[in-house]
Amino acid sequence: MNENEWVAKVSGLVGRLDATEQMIFMAALRALANKEFTVDQFTEWAGSRIERHRAGEVLHLSDLETGAAA
């Protein structure tokens, strides 16, 4: 898979997320890009928050803080 195919695939997957899930994903992605998260930390952090959201828990802006912003 080349870079353009990878970007298209990720964009398609992100497009399936609701607005809250997209905010969670983008916060985690920013932390990954800034080297605040490893890939494993990105997966755990984003996954746990998306699961909480999907379970009906109300998330707050403070739940989107990644550490450096906290």
Image (cartoon, rainbow, N blue to C red):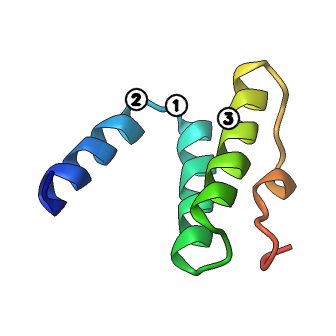
Residue that protrudes farthest toward the top in the picture: 55
- Residue 52 has which mark? none
Tag 2 near tag 1, CB within 8 Å: no
Query: Which amino acid, mark 2?
Result: Arg
20 on left or right of 63: left
| Numbered disc 2: secondary structure | loop
Q: CA distance from mark 1 to mark 3?
A: 10 Å
Q: Residue at x 62, y 68 (%)?
A: 38
Instruction: Give the number of callouts.
Output: 3
What residue did someone put label 1 on?
18
**Label 2 environment density (alpha carbons within 10 Å; few <14, some 14–19, many ≥20):** few
Residue 68, percent from left and from top: 78, 79
Is the residue marked by circle 1 packed among few (<14), some (14-19), or many (20+) residues within 10 Å? few
Residue annotated with mark 3? 50
The residue at which mark 2 appears reads as 16
The three-letter code of the residue at mark 1 reads: Asp
